[in-house]
Amino acid sequence: DAKTTQPNSMESNEEEPVHLPCNHSTISGTDYIHWYRQLPSQGPEYVIHGLTSNVNNRMASLAIAEDRKSSTLILHRATLRDAAVYYCILRALYGGSQGNLIFGKGTKLSVKP
Amino acid sequence: NAGVMQNPRHLVRRRGQEARLRCSPMKGHSHVYWYRQLPEEGLKFMVYLQKENIIDESGMPKERFSAEFPKEGPSILRIQQVVRGDSAAYFCASSPRDREDGYTFGSGTRLTVV
């Protein structure tokens, strides 16, 4: 599976937008970009995913570079409840991993009041 | 529509005992995945199952660990003869048939071996 690179940590102020970057320079044409987050002492939570076009849902937006070698998860107004570890994961539509998600270290987001 | 249900939430076992962790996937989800998270570490894939089939067990330790997803009932992750190093949070996730969709994770079972 192609790998992703994320900053170890980021800080944000409450009610400000947050842009969480992810690099995936070896992405293949059939890899979906998934984002999950894990709040303290909880299981991971699906946030958003996309293939080529930018995506929006009630939780966040996903901006995907034209060459697909990077993407950015956008939280439009951070709240204290958004403090979590955010994982950017490539999920192969076909092939050897059978689609299981490979979690890296993620980005630990801290939100200051 | 209930989410992924895992039980028990907390499990304490003495060294050498067996641990059984249960996972009921979301209604309509036929794919189940088990992950382990050691203290202060990331999530590690263990096994991927469909009903009555193990699809990928590449992350399972070679001994003492087994998993099943029977035709009826929950998926079970079984750890025989537990050791202190098995203490971790074990998460189950499920997904619909379509691989493009996201996973839904349960709240996990926190196993403590004393």
Image (cartoon, grey):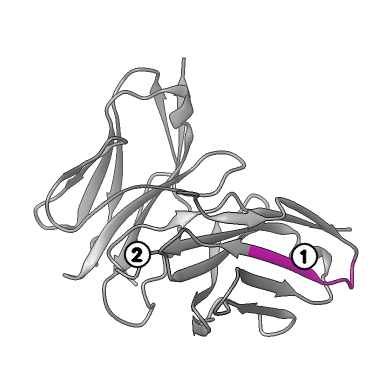
Find residue A72 and report its horizontal and vertical position in percent. 25, 43
Q: Which residue is mark 2?
A: A3
Find residue B65 and report its horizontal and vertical position in percent. 70, 78
Chain under callout 2: A
Q: Do the residues under discs 2 and 1 have CB atoms within 8 angstroms?
A: no
**Which kind of residue does numbered mark 1 sit on?**
Gly
**Which kind of residue does numbered mark 2 sit on?**
Lys
- In the figure, is residue A13 to the left or right of A24? right
Q: Does the segment drawn in magenta span residue B17?
A: yes
Find residue B62 and report its horizontal and vertical position in percent. 67, 85
Residues in magenta, as a range: B15-22
Find residue A2 and report its horizontal and vertical position in percent. 31, 69
Tag 2 secondary structure: loop
Tag 1 secondary structure: helix
**Viewer-proximal residue among A10 and A56:** A56
Q: Is residue A110 above or below residue B81?
A: above
On the rendered image, what quadrant is the N terminus of chain A found in? Answer: bottom left
Q: Does the segment drawn in magenta span residue B56?
A: no
Q: Which residue is mark 1?
A: B85
- In the figure, is residue A88 to the left or right of B61? left
